[in-house]
Image: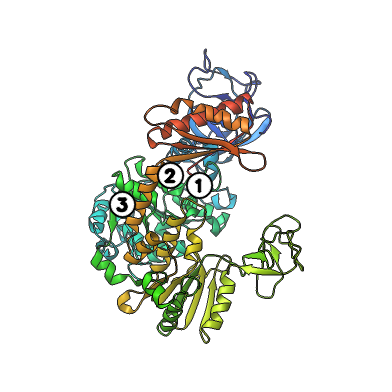
Amino acid sequence: MQDGLFPVSDSVGPSASGPGAGGGKGWLMPEPPEKLAATNPVARVVVESPLPHLDRPFDYLVPDALDGDAVAGARVRVRFAGRELHGYIVERREDSDSGTRLSVLDKVVSPVPVLTPEVLELCRLVAARYAGTVSDVLRLAIPGRVASCEKDWTPRGDVPDDESSLPDVQAPEEAWTRLGKGAAFLQHVRAGGDPHAVVTVPEGYGPHAWPELFAEAAVATLHSGRNALLVVPDRRDLDRLAAALAHHMPRGLVARLSAEDGPSVRYREYLRVLGGYARVVIGTRAASYAPLRDLGLVAIWDDGDDVHAEPRAPYPHARELLMIRSSQGRGAACILAGHSRSTEAERLVENGWAQSVEADRPLLRAVTPRVVNTADSFHQERDPLATAARLPHAAWQAAKDALAHGPVLIQVARGGYAPTLLCAECSNPLRCSKCEGPLHVPATGAAPECRWCGTVHRTVTCRVCGSQRYTVAGNGVLRTAEQLGRAFPGARVVSSSAGRVKDEVSGAGTLVVATLGAEPVAPEGYAAALLLDGDQMLRRENLRAAEETVRRWFNAASLVRPARDGGVVMVTAEHELAVGALVRWDPASFAARELAERRELHLPPAVRVAALTGPKDAVEHLQQALAPLQEGEHEVRIVGPVPFDDGDYRTLCFIPFAVASEAARLLRAAKAAASAKRTHAAAQVRFDGLDLL
């Protein structure tokens, strides 16, 4: 907790805004008198503070010298309880209703109105949903200032677009017309409607892949007189989407918002959007806050990918942000698309918020590969050792045959070379002698290293039996590539994993070994794909293990050629339901089954979950705030507190959607009260974390 950031007396500092704060004239002149702005001399400011009880605007006086620059949305510096803080002007007013002496704005850091009313309202809604503070959300929403980018910036105004700069209204929409209900959905968007759709895309490459689908939706939105916001997981997806849009519209209409592009590029693109120069915004999760006016479409690709979840407070998910944006103002169309379907998306379909848009069975049979499970009864009878082998003979034979016709993809679960080391005598996991971190071998012939501190261990001694011999448990992507290079002599082996991700591969005789999510795209499609380590992925201690495994499988399988062109996918796992969904190419039914089971057990996403983490007394204080919701038809189920980590405790609260807004409000109020009174240490409130269960 930071000292000095508390409400101040009448004689110093700003005053909290709001009715009932004081009487009389409403605000007092500063001492000594200073010439104030002639019009609207009061600026309402949101200060950047992590303290929950300061999560409200404060009033300041605007001196005449700053009148022209102190516009709504501008960055400012103010004095608060003797300290200098940054903030944003959210409103200029004629007077204040605080009844206390007001301080004067210290400085206008930048006159550019980077905080628009729509983005401010979005930040307030996000803070309310996740029991956070507006200040925390603003840190996520507005990129850091780069002064050099502001020198020549001017808003474009309401100048209409030149018709010649708009995409051709007759642009083909083949990617949508091939999907059931797809043509009707796009027609609704073009007519200015705001439909919601959960879209399942069968192909991951070629002219009908998801980037083309998003590009066609953006074109339809522009011709309705509105703008589009498209969010993807990472840089590779962003590059593919940018290339697809370049075939449909001038590059000047598209802005790209991604932290990976660097602060200068990101801020320059943000200013282009703010100024009205861009009509289509593409980017990663932070782009969800883009100050895009006249929003007609929001779309997110692969909403089940955990990179869409913000790791910083208040931990919002890009999917939820876009759903909020689709309901703001006049409403906007919303697309949740993927090769598979998340249980959250399935819940939206079942409750009627969104329509399901997917290919019919004849199209699926025409464009998807043949899927073979090497662990089924047929293959087990032919090869009894198939379930014990990491690469069964049937999978090896399929890869060998396919290499003559195109590249072959091998999907593995873990990166590195040898991710885990065990004692050769007693099988005890070996740990670092300095920090107790797990040991691994980073490359062939290398000495063991600690994953946590990086210490190299020339000799390793087991603490249980004293043996200095170790064995490798598990194969990483590099070791797998090394082994497959020997198994397929003459093949060109390419590895793709964290730090060395390949964007594209091509050519027959190429064997691509990739970790989850790092699979390169083959422009003509892979001839075959081998999905290894399936049982290992399914055995993870996580509520979403099966859902995540199926998502990874579909993402890889969608890159393979159709069965009619010889495309085949070999999966090595024994989970009948998960493998069955892939064999039938039916991710929707798997998501529906998963959701039904979780609904029966009252687990997310059938309910919301909030994790309260911190000192035991602080966690119990927050629990007490939910006491009014622990009875009645929509009862909040509380588990904990239990010891968690580093002396902290954790409580999990399972909250029905009917009372979720009230629960977030109560937790937010309890945090603010504890912060203001200093009665309890700070505790973290985290809603809907993907790793909580």
How far is disc 3 from disc 2 in space, using C-alphas? 21 Å
Secondary structure beneath label 1:
loop
User: Callout 2: helix, strand or loop?
Assistant: loop
Near mark 1 (Cα within 10 A), the count class, few <14, some 14-19 or many ≥20, is few
Question: Who comes first in sequence, dot 3 or dot 1?
Answer: 3
**Quadrant including the N terminus:** top right
Q: Label for residue 604?
A: 2
At 52% from the left and 35% from the top, the residue drawn is 89
* Image position, residue 452 (x, y; %): 68, 57
- Mark before the other along the chain sequence, 2 or 1: 2
Specify the farthest residue to the bottom. Answer: 490
Which of 623 and 505 lies nearest the eye of the viewer? 623
Q: What's the residue type where badge 1 is placed?
A: Leu
Q: Is residue 614 above or below residue 434?
A: above
Residue 293's label in the rendered image is: none
Per the image, the residue denoted by label 3 is: 197
Q: Is residue 34 above or below residue 22?
A: below
Mark 1, residue position: 693
| Residue 70 visible to the viewer | no
- Report the amino acid beneath label 2: Pro
Q: Nearer the viewer, residue 678 or 136?
A: 678
Between the residue at mark 3 and the residue at mark 1, the CA separation in whole angstroms equals 28 Å
User: Where in the figure is residue 640, as x and y percent of width and height?
Assistant: 55, 36
